[in-house]
Every structure is written in structure tokens, then in C-alpha cells.
Amino acid sequence: MTRQQLIDQIRKKHSYLCVGLDTDITKIPQHLLAEPDPVFAFNKAIIDATKDLCVAYKTNTAFYEALGVKGWEAMEKTAHYIGDQHFKIADAKRGDIGNTSDQYAKAFFEALPFDSVTVAPYMGEDSVKPFLQYPGKWAIVLGLTSNKGAADFELQQAGGGLLYEKVMNTVSAWGTPENLMFVVGATQADSFTNIRKITPSHFYLVPGVGAQGGSLKEISEKAMNQDCGILVNASRAIIYASEGEDFAEAAKQAAAGYQAEMKLYLSIH
């Protein structure tokens, strides 16, 4: 999906919501465990319920890889089922030496139909560049994350500034706003103003709203640009809105709440 196609979807749906499919087989409703593929059955129902309210889905690959071959198959079926009208994110946090990253890029962009992969930049340019070689595909590079451990490295001084600032400054020159996004955690809302100065035109994937307590209002006020420029992810707050057989309808209602709030912020930005 190109940048313009993504922007068009945001404007069409009045939404910049990304639904996180962090599907934990131990948390899905019990009645689905009788299905041949419980994870895919759950995902399919969530997608059907939320597809009109969001513009993206983020598949956290760890929850699928943990199930072995069956999990990988569920992930592949889910990616195909989402289709081309939504921005598909493989939240895999890959990043290795060049020839290895080449293979990771092939895995998610050729063998699987994802639009983007989250990438860890620690090993430098050659570990990120392979993800930037596919037209219409994106690398989403870790910038400033929402976890407690962000303080260990990302928020340390490095070369006259904070390490995450150096990372975002440097990485932004490896690609363009057409193929490069950054992960910026919702719990780091106070930093968005500064981050926008570093990368004024890039999109951000913003996890941490909902269960982690990030403020959608604060993020929207501080991080949006003229093209919206943000994809706000909510996972547990949507997909586990109910533990019962009404889980899909509950997910729809939760997503609708986010979309209504987003529509308001888009209208006043």
C-alpha cells in the first residue's frame, strides 16, 4: 500500500485506527477452541466486525510463531483475509546483517502479503535497507518505545542528544516518508512535539493506547501532521473487549469508540 492509498483510507473512514491482532490462544473465547483453526476463526470474526472502523491491522508475529507451523498458517491466512484495503503490519521487530534481512524481507513481502514490517535499527543501515527495496512496502523502525526498558538505551545521552533522536535523524535519511515509518509509543506523548521536528513528514505507528494507558487525545494533538501521519494501535482493548460469545460485537463497539473520537480530531486538525 502506498502512502497516498493509506491517506485516502484515513480520509474515507475518518479513522487512523490500527487493530492489533495479538491473538493469544489462551485468551480467546472457549467456544472457538472447537474450530479447526481457533486463532484464524477468532481473527476472522474480529476483522469482519472492525474492518469498516480501522485502516490497518497489526499482527504480532510472536503470538503465531509460538504455536509452530499451525500458528504460521493462521498468520498467513489472516494476512490474506485482511485483503488489500487495509494496511497490513507484521510486528516482527526484525533486523540483522544484510543478507539475513534480505530473507526476512522476502518472508513478509513475498511469501506473505504484508505491507510493512517493524524493524529494530540497532545493527545499522544494512539491516534496515532490504526492507526499503520493495515498491509500496514499508519498514517501520523502532524510534521511541513505550516499554519501561526504553530508559535503558533510547533515552540515554548520545552525541549531544538522546539516542532515540540520533536513531530517528539517521534512519530518516535511509528511506523516505513514502516507505519509512517509526514506532513511537503512546506513553511517550510529551516527546511527540520534539519528534515531529525531527521527522515532520513521516507516519508514526503508535502503540500503547488502551490497555497501556496512552491518551488518544494527547497523541492526536501533538503528533498529527497535514496528512494525519499517525496510525494508533489498540490491541487488547479491542480484541478482548469481551470473553464471551459476543466478543466480535464487543470488539466492534470498542473500535467504534476509537473511530468516533478520531473523526473528531481529524475534523479539527
Image: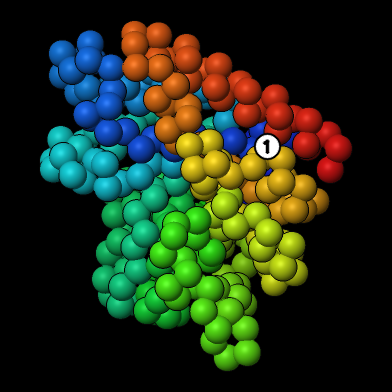
Query: Disc 1 residue type?
Result: Ile
Question: Where does residue 243 sit, x and y in percent of width and height?
Answer: 34, 17
Q: In the rendered image, which residue does mark 1 sit on?
A: 10
Say whether residue 268 is left or right of residue 208. Answer: right
Q: Residue at x 20, y 37 (%)?
A: 71
Q: Callout 1 environment at 10 Å: few (<14), some (14 to 19), or many (20+)?
A: many
Vertical relation: 106 (above or below) 122: above
Q: Quadrant of residue 201?
A: bottom right
Q: In the orientation shown, which residue stands out farthest toward the bottom?
A: 159
Front residue of this view, candidates 259 and 186 = 186
Applied colour scheme: rainbow
Q: Quadrant of the C terminus?
A: top right
Q: Quadrant of residue 246?
A: top left
Question: Where does residue 73 sit, x and y in percent of width and height?
Answer: 21, 36
Q: Residue at x 63, y 29 (%)?
A: 258
Q: Residue at x 15, y 35 (%)?
A: 70
Question: Where does residue 212 sit, x and y in percent of width and height?
Answer: 49, 43
Say whether residue 72 is left or right of residue 22. Answer: left
Q: Is residue 71 visible?
A: yes
Front residue of this view, candidates 20 and 14 = 20
Question: Where does residue 72 sit, x and y in percent of width and height?
Answer: 21, 41
Front residue of this view, candidates 159 and 46 = 159
Vertical relation: 142 (above or below) 232: below
Q: How many marks?
A: 1
Q: Residue at x 71, y 40 (%)?
A: 217
**Which element is circle 1 on?**
helix
